[in-house]
C-alpha cells in the first residue's frame, strides 16, 4: 500500500507550503503517482496547484467536531490507492493528533500496510524546536518523523543557534534530518503570487531566475532523496504491480 506524508510545522510562515511544493515536484521527478491534499481552509495555495481536480471540488480539513471526521477521512481512504501528501495548516497539532488517536489510525495503518510519516518543518527558533519535540515525544516511535531544517524561512536560526538539546533527542529517536535550502525572494514570491509550479515559473522568468530555481531544486531533491522514503515507496509499488501481473 502507498504511504501518507504529513507536512507539519505548527507555526505559520515557516515554509510548510514551500516544502509541500518541493516534495510534490520531487515525487513527479521520480515518476511517483500521488494525491496532494491541502487541509488549510483559509489559504489552500498548494492545493490550487497540485491537488487532483476531483479534490478541488471537496475541501478537506481537520475539525474538533467528530461529525466532521469525514472531511479528514478522505486522506486515509485515498492512501489505500496511492501515495498522499498532506499540507497541514498552522496550530493543528491537537486536532490532527486527536483524529489519529481517536480513530486508532496508527494501528489501522499497520494492519492495512500504510505507513504514515511526518515531515516537520523547523526554523531553528526555540518555539519551533519545542513544537517539533512535542510532536516527537507524543508519538514516540509510533509515527516516524523527518526533521526539515528550513534555511530559507524568515527568522531561521540554523546558522547561529545552539542545538545541543535538539541533536541529543534527534539522535535518541533516530530521526532523519534534512536541510531545505533558501529560494531567493524573487522566485519564491513569483511562485506564490502566480500559483504555479516550478516548471511554469522557470518558463516565464529570466535566465538567472531559472538558474536559481534549478540550484534550489537540485539541493532540495538531494536532501529529500537522502531519506530514501520516496524511493522505497516506488520500489514497493513496482513490486506490488509485478505481483498483480503474475497473479493475473
Image: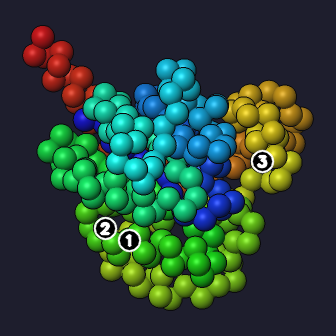
Badges 2 and 1: C-beta atoms under 8 Å apart? yes
- Snapshot quadrant of residue 160: bottom right
Q: Quadrant of the N terminus?
A: top left
Residue at the spot 86% in from the left edge and 48% down from the top edge: 186
| Image spot of residue 214 (x, y percent) | 71, 42
Q: Is the residue marked by circle 2 packed among few (<14), some (14-19), or many (20+) residues within 10 Å?
A: some
**Above or below, comparing residue 105 to residue 68 in the picture:** below
Kindly state the secondary structure of the residue where label 1 is placed: helix
- Circle on res. 188: 3
Q: CA distance from mark 2 to mark 1?
A: 6 Å
Q: Is residue 119 visible?
A: yes
Q: CA distance from mark 3 to mark 2?
A: 33 Å
Q: Nearer the viewer, residue 148 or 90?
A: 90
Determine which residue is flagged by label 2. 139
Mark 1 or 3, nearer chain start: 1
Q: CA distance from mark 1 to mark 3?
A: 29 Å
| Image spot of residue 14 (x, y percent) | 65, 62
Determine which residue is flagged by label 1. 136
Kindly state the secondary structure of the residue where label 3 is placed: helix
Amino acid at each position: 500500500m502507498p504511504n501518507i506524508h504529513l507536512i507539519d510545522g505548527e507555526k505559520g510562515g515557516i515554509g510548510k507550503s514551500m516544502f509541500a511544493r518541493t516534495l510534490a515536484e520531487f515525487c513527479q521527478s521520480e515518476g511517483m503517482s500521488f494525491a496532494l491534499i491541502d487541509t488549510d481552509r483559509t489559504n489552500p495555495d498548494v492545493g490550487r496547484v497540485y491537488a487532483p481536480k476531483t479534490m478541488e471540488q471537496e475541501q478537506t480539513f481537520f475539525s474538533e467536531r467528530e461529525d466532521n471526521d469525514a472531511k479528514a477521512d478522505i486522506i486515509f481512504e485515498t492512501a489505500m490507492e496511492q501515495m498522499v501528501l498532506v499540507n497541514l495548516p498552522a496550530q493543528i497539532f491537537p486536532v490532527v493528533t486527536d483524529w489519529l488517536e481517536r480513530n486508532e489510525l496508527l494501528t489501522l495503518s499497520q494492519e492495512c500496510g500504510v505507513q504514515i510519516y511526518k515531515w516537520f518543518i523547523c526554523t531553528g527558533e526555540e518555539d519551533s524546536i519545542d513544537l517539533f519535540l512535542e510532536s516527537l515525544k507524543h508519538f514516540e516511535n509510533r509515527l516516524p518523523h523527518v526533521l526539515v531544517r528550513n534555511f530559507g524561512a524568515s527568522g531561521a536560526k540554523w546558522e547561529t543557534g545552539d542545538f545541543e538539546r535538539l541533536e541529543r533527542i534527534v539522535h535518541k529517536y533516530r530521526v532523519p534530518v534534512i536541510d531545505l535550502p533558501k529560494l531567493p525572494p524573487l522566485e519564491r514570491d513569483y511562485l506564490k503570487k502566480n500559483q504555479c509550479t516550478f516548471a511554469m515559473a522557470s518558463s516565464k522568468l529570466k535566465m538567472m531566475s531559472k538558474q536559481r530555481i534549478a540550484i534550489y531544486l537540485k539541493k532540495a531533491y538531494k536532501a529529500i532523496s537522502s531519506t530514501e522514503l520516496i524511493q522505497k515507496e516506488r520500489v514497493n509499488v513496482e513490486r506490488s504491480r509485478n505481483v498483480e501481473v503474475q497473479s493475473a
